[in-house]
Image (spheres, rainbow, N blue to C red):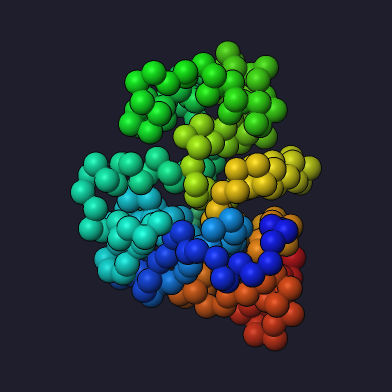
Amino acid sequence: MTDKANIANRNIVLEIKDLHKSFGDNHVLNGFSMQLHQGENLVIMGKSGSGKSVMIKCLVGLMEADSGAITVMGNDITKLNQESLDILRADIGFLFQGSALYDSMTVRENLEFPLRRHTKKFGDNVDTEKLVIEALENVGLISAIDLMPAELSGGMKRRIAIARTLILQPKIILYDEPTSGLDPITAKEIIILMQEIQKKYNTSSLIITHDVDCARVISDRMILLIHGIDYAVGTFKELSVSKDPKIKAFFKQ
Ligand SMILES: Nc1ncnc2c1ncn2[C@@H]1O[C@H](COP(=O)(O)OP(=O)(O)O)[C@@H](O)[C@H]1O
Ligand SMILES: [Mg+2]
C-alpha cells in the first residue's frame, strides 16, 4: 500500500467515464468509470472474461471503445492527433498480460525496442546502454542482459517485461495480471518489485488482477468490475467486509 494519506485530494492522472464496448451481442463494458490519482495503486478486480483486458486496451488505444471518455493527464485521448497521442503514450507503461517478450530478441534488444519507438522522449543523443542497464538493475536482472527469453524462468520473464515498461520512465503504469501464471513465492516477489518501483519513481499504477493476495498487499483503493460497470469502489478493508454476495464472492478464496 502507498504510505500516504488523502489520496482523494490528489490530482487525477487518468479518468474513464461511462465506457461502453460490445462485440456483437456480447456487451462487455456497459458504462465503466474510474479515476486514478497521482501516486495511487488502484486495483481492478473482475472475474475472468469480465472485460478487464478490454478496458485496458481501450485505455492505451489498442482497441476503440464504442463510447465514453478517457482523459489522461488532462488530455481527452479521443481528441488528440497521432503525434500528441504518441507523446502521451510514452508516459504510460503497459505491462501486457503474459509478459509478451519478443522471443527472437535478446533481453537487451527487447529493452531497446521501446526506446526506438519513442525517440522523441529522450532525444537523439540518448545513452541507450545506460538506460538498459538502469532498467535491468531496477529489476535485479543485469546478469540476464544477453540471454534469450527462452532461457528465462516465468518470474524472470515478468521482471524483464517490467524493466521494458520502466525504460521509458512512465508516469503511469498499467499492469494486466502481473502475477498470473506465477507460483505464489515468485508472485510475491513481483508484488514487492511493483511496490519498490512505485516508491522510487512515485508512479501511479492501475493493477488488473484476480489475485486477492496481490490486491490486499498493493491496493490503496479497489474497483470491482462486475456486469461491465464499476460495481463497487473502496479500500480492500471496506470491500472485504461487504455483505453483498457479488462482492463477497471475490474474497472467498
Ligand atoms: N477482439 C475481441 N473480439 C471479440 N471478443 C472479444 C475480443 N476481445 C475480448 N473479447 C471478449 O470480451 C470479453 C472480455 O474479455 P477480456 O477483457 O479479455 O476479459 P478479462 O477480464 O479476463 O481480461 C470476453 O467475453 C471476450 O471473449
Ligand atoms: Mg485479461
Residue 154 picture quarter:
top right
x and y, in percent, of residue 251 in the image: 71, 70
Query: Which residue of the protein is positioned furthest toward the top in this rendering?
Result: 146
Q: Is there any visible trace of residue 29 in the rendered image?
A: no
Query: Which residue of the protein is positioned furthest toward the right in this rendering?
Result: 185
At 70% from the left and 28% from the top, the residue drawn is: 140
Q: Is there any visible trace of residue 143 in the rendered image?
A: yes
At 66% from the left and 64% from the top, the residue drawn is: 220
Q: 142 or 4, which is in the foreground?
A: 4
x and y, in percent, of residue 78 in the image: 26, 58
Q: Is residue 207 above or below residue 68?
A: above
Q: Is residue 166 left or right of residue 68?
A: right
Q: Is residue 60 left or right of residue 245?
A: left
At 47% from the left and 19% from the top, the residue drawn is: 128
x and y, in percent, of residue 77 in the image: 30, 56
Q: Is residue 31 left or right of residue 154?
A: left
